[in-house]
Image (spheres, helix red, strand yellow):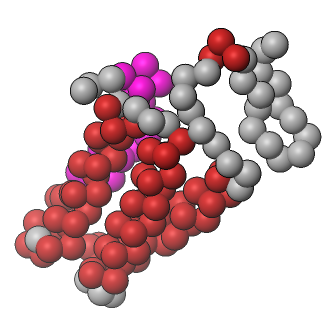
Amino acid sequence: MSSAPTFAFEPALRDQAEDDGHRDFPGRGLLINVLRIFHIAGLAGMSTVVLAGAGEAVSWGALMVTSGLGIVALDAWANPIYFRQAKGIGTLLKIALVMLLVAWETGRVPLFWSILAYSVALSHAPSWIRHRKLL
């Protein structure tokens, strides 16, 4: 049976042959989207800190890191090899860079733009790059 969408807001069905250890639970997608809303709010706040000199870097950074760790935890639970793939390792690096962004006041502007470019490149890279096993 090929993958087919359902009409009850459930993920598409998977072939038994495609069973690669992924796990899911009802509402996981919604929970990740809520965490993404908080993550983008943290990004917007951190943007005002870096680009306009306004706001509190620690608060916005904490919101970004906390929501990011929540997303990572859900992704890692759903995909047992997440931390062996480029996307998992790359995301951990991104979280570390955001913590550096909060702490390193004099380097914030170039680091901010570097993290932003890196994040876009990682999240929009082809799946053969994101899902590549590195470890």
| Quadrant in which residue 102 is drawn | bottom left
Circle count:
0
Q: Position of residue 119 (x, y in %)?
A: 36, 47
On-image quarter of the N terminus: top right
Check the picture and name the quadrant holding the C terminus.
top left
Q: Name the residue: 40% across, 32% down.
A: 81
Task: Give whichever of 87, 114 is nearer the camera.
Answer: 87
> Quadrant of the rendered structure where residue 97 is?
bottom left
On the rendered structure, is 100 left or right of 80? Answer: left
User: In the shown orientation, is residue 129 left or right of residue 35?
Assistant: left
Instruction: Provide residue 46's location: percent of width, then percent of height.
Output: 34, 73
Magenta residue span: 113-132
* Residue 121 in picture, x, y percent from top left: 36, 38
Membership of 120 in magenta stretch: yes
Q: In this view, does 47 lie above or below 114?
A: below
Q: What kind of secondary structure does the magenta stretch mostly adopt?
A: helix
Can the viewer see residue 20 in this picture?
Answer: yes
Q: Residue at x 45, y 36 (%)?
A: 80
The residue positioned 60% from the left and 38% from the top of the image is 23
The answer to whether 87 is drawn above or below residue 35 in the figure is: above
| Lateral position of residue 28 relative to residue 36, left or right | right
Q: Is residue 27 magenta?
A: no
